[in-house]
Amino acid sequence: MTVPETDAARAAARSDAGEVLLLDVREDDEWAAGHAPGAVHAPLSRLRLQDVPGDRPVVAVCRSGGRSGQATAALMGAGRDVVNLSGGMLEWAAAGLAVVQDDGSPGSVL
């Protein structure tokens, strides 16, 4: 199944405007190292539909786009409005967008 995708700049702009939920499906250690500000963490290995707020469209995020593509397909199958972040957090960081730790300090992408 081909899933719809968006790029980092558009995802960031839509997230900043409150239009979408960034759903980070990476594992705990990856999340702890750094994530997009405002993202919600729900590891793919434990992802449940009820863990994903349904109040707005979702942009699924992982390191490079593979796992978030799987999450996108699963959420689409459940009828959710969702797109995959092309290139994942690697692309996000390469675009110069903020990567933070839980305390707000600068983070990194594992």
Image (tube, rainbow, N blue to C red):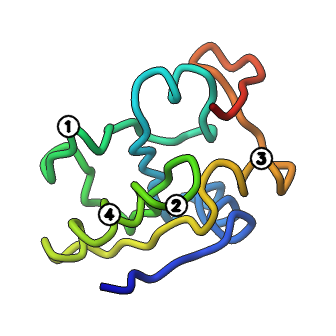
Name the kind of residue labelled 4 in the image: Gln
Residue 83 position in % (x across, y down): 44, 73
Quadrant showing the C terminus: top right
Alpha carbon distance from label 1 to label 3: 25 Å
Location of mark 3 (residue): 93
Of tags 4 and 3, which is closer to the observer? 4
Residue 50 position in % (x across, y down): 13, 48
Alpha carbon distance from label 2 to label 1: 17 Å
Q: Is residue 50 left or right of residue 11?
A: left
- Asked if the residue at tag 3 contacts the one at tag 4, i.e. Cβ–Cβ closer than 8 Å, the answer is no
Alpha carbon distance from label 4 to label 3: 21 Å
Badge 3 local density, few (<14 within 10 Å), some, or many (20+)? some
Alpha carbon distance from label 4 to label 2: 9 Å
* Mark closest to the chain's N terminus, 2 or 1: 1
Location of mark 2 (residue): 65
- Tell me the element at label 3: helix
* Mark closest to the chain's N terminus, 4 or 3: 4
Q: Residue at x 33, y 67 (%)?
A: 72
Residue 64 to residue 86: above or below: above
Q: Is residue 51 left or right of residue 9?
A: left
Q: Residue at x 51, y 28 (%)?
A: 31
Give the camera-side residue of 46 and 38.
46
Location of mark 1 (residue): 46
* Mark closest to the chain's N terminus, 4 or 2: 2
* Mark closest to the chain's N terminus, 3 or 2: 2
Name the kind of residue labelled 3 in the image: Ala
Badge 2 local density, few (<14 within 10 Å), some, or many (20+)? many
Give the camera-side residue of 5 and 64.
64
Q: Quadrant of residue 44?
A: top left
